[in-house]
Amino acid sequence: MKRKQLRRHVFLNDDPARIKYGAALNFYPVEAAAIFAELRAAGVNIVTTRKALAYDPEQGRPGTLIFDSEASLAALRHETQHFRDNRDLGFPSLSYFLKSKELFWRMEFRAYLAELSFAREVKDFDLGRDILENARRRKREIDGESP
């Protein structure tokens, strides 16, 4: 997949936990606050919107969390995992991940595992299946296959 096409797919807002479990800020305020405290302490720029949810890495910097105020805790964990993985790699830019489908998928896979941890905690196996389907769809997109 070309950089422009893949970048468009980076900013998805597919959040199956939102419908059933609501916004992290409203229904899981303690964990959401802890996550935001971690991100702010690390220097992440947080932009609140109602249109998108993404972590946008920046070369040598903590990057930006584009946060949909209605996002679920599962989705917030997903994006936070992207930040943590990016931090652990020394804050490379998005182009670093786009050079390798395998690396890009590994980062996505780890973020979907963070979402799945929420589904396990609430013992919602249907949600877990929905998250896995999103992960499969994401893998196909990264590999350049039709969804």
Image (tube, rainbow, N blue to C red):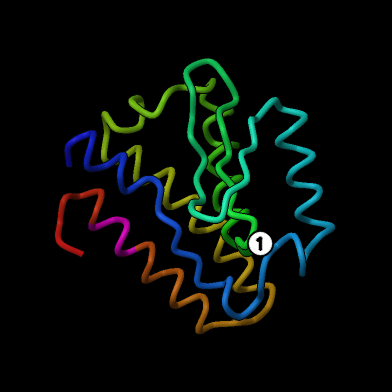
- What residue is at 62 percent from the left and 64 percent from the top? 72
Q: Position of residue 66 (x, y in %)?
A: 55, 43
Q: Which residue is nearer to you in this view: 68 or 42?
A: 68
Q: Residue furthest front?
A: 50
User: Where on the picture, by quarter, is residue 46?
Assistant: top right
Q: In the drawing, does residue 82 fall left or right of residue 133?
A: right
Q: Which residue is nearer to you in this view: 47 or 138?
A: 47
Q: Residue furthest top?
A: 60
The quarter of the picture where the C terminus appears is: bottom left
Q: Position of residue 142 (x, y in %)?
A: 25, 48
Q: Which residue is nearer to you in this view: 57 or 45?
A: 45
Q: Is label 1 in a helix, a strand or a loop?
A: helix
- What residue is at 80 percent from the left and 47 percent from the top? 34
Say above or below: 14 vs 127: above
Q: In the drawing, does residue 134 fall left or right of residue 124?
A: left
Crowdedness near tag 1: few (<14), some (14–19) or many (≥20) residues, C-alpha within 10 Å: many
Q: Position of residue 37 (x, y in %)?
A: 79, 39
Say above or below: 49 vs 44: below
Disc 1: which residue: 73
Q: Residue furthest right?
A: 30
Q: Amino acid at mark 1?
A: Leu
- What residue is at 56 percent from the left and 55 percent from the top? 50
Q: In the image, is residue 119 part of the stretch drawn in magenta?
A: no
- What residue is at 62 percent from the left and 62 percent from the top? 70
Q: Position of residue 7 (x, y in %)?
A: 31, 39
The quarter of the picture where the N terminus appears is: top left
How many numbered discs, if any? 1
Q: In the drawing, does residue 6 fall left or right of residue 73?
A: left
Over which residues does the magenta segment extend? 136-140
Q: In the image, is residue 138 part of the stretch drawn in magenta?
A: yes
Q: Main secondary structure of the magenta part?
A: helix
